[in-house]
Image: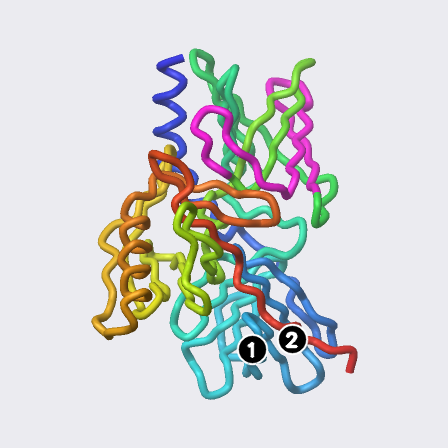
Amino acid sequence: MGTARALLATLVMTGLGGCAGLEAPSDTVPTPDAGPLTMQCGTLSAAFENRGDQPVLAVAGERYPLARVRSASGARYEAVGDSGTTFWNKGDRARLTLNGEPRPVCLSPGAVAQPFEASGNEPFWHVVLDGGTLTLERPGEASVTGPFRWHSQSASVSRGAVSLNGDEAEVTVRHEACQDSMSGMPHPRQVAISWQGRTLSGCGGDPARLLRGGTWIVDDLPGRGIVDGSRMSVTFLEDGRLTGMASCNRYMGVYRLTGEGLTIRRPASTLKACAPALMDQEQRFLERLRAVQHFRLAKGGLLELVGADGTLVRLHRQSVPSVYTDG
């Protein structure tokens, strides 16, 4: 079991961070007068619509008129008058940048970003799906590789198959959160591989996709509550930075995701003075961020930042108004 634990930690820390990359895409791009193409960019939803001469990107409660620009592949757009907001569509996935900040790779319903990695325990196993090839690794056994193909892909579940050592293996990827049975780390996908009369079950995808994309709003600081009318928030950025409102001041810091947990370092705020109650709450909030060791998803889509003694901060995704109407 010690060998399996060490292998798991190494594989997750070195591999899963790459799960948000783009695989070789199809050349399909939205056509004129097409209805909204909705994608999920981590925790953020984005919709691209092309009505005649004016494509529009709707994201985070805003509508951005777009102009198409030259690109080596796919279809790349910039917001009119704002070169820092771009949408680069490559079939069932896209790159999104808002106000100069890259967001997680956007995926259409059912799409799986590659390279895609998954693993499970008891017995330990690890798979990598990349470029139409799937590789299965198990401690003490030679890795096996075969050509992979999808049978079906939908917003809830994607199914495919691979030939390993001459035997067909069925792969099921459910687009639901999954908690690793050994480390407790949440992942965005549930994975099952049926091969040679047994089923290997585990979790897959990059845990960062559960955090990044949109903004999280603090609901509660357990044990203390929050000041009425105050606002605390956390936004996990793509480059390992986080930012948000601490009650009175904005703050910035850095975070790190490993195979075992989440840590937040150096959260520092600006120096505006506010009412004593808000200043006290701000200091307590920043202290709790420094003590975070892990995160988990709770009922209702809540995010809990967890320390050695339990939940430190409880948050919900920032809601945004609907951006499309029937007209």
How many dots with numbers?
2
Q: Quadrant of residue 257?
A: top left
Range shown magenta: 157-186
Determine whether 160 is above or below 26 in the image. Answer: above
- Location of mark 2 (residue): 323
Is residue 179 part of the magenta span, yes or no?
A: yes
Residue 95 placement, left or right of 199: left
Q: Quadrant of residue 281?
A: bottom left
SS assignment at label 2: loop
> Which disc number belongs to residue 62?
1
Mark 1 / mark 2, whichever is N-terminal: 1
SS assignment at label 1: strand
- Contact, mark 1 vs mark 2 (Cβ under 8 Å): yes
Q: Nearer the viewer, residue 298 or 90?
A: 298
Residue 168: horizontal and vertical position, in percent? 69, 23
How far, Cα to Cα, is label 1 from label 2? 7 Å
Residue 112: horizontal and vertical position, in percent? 59, 46
Amino acid at pointer 2: Val
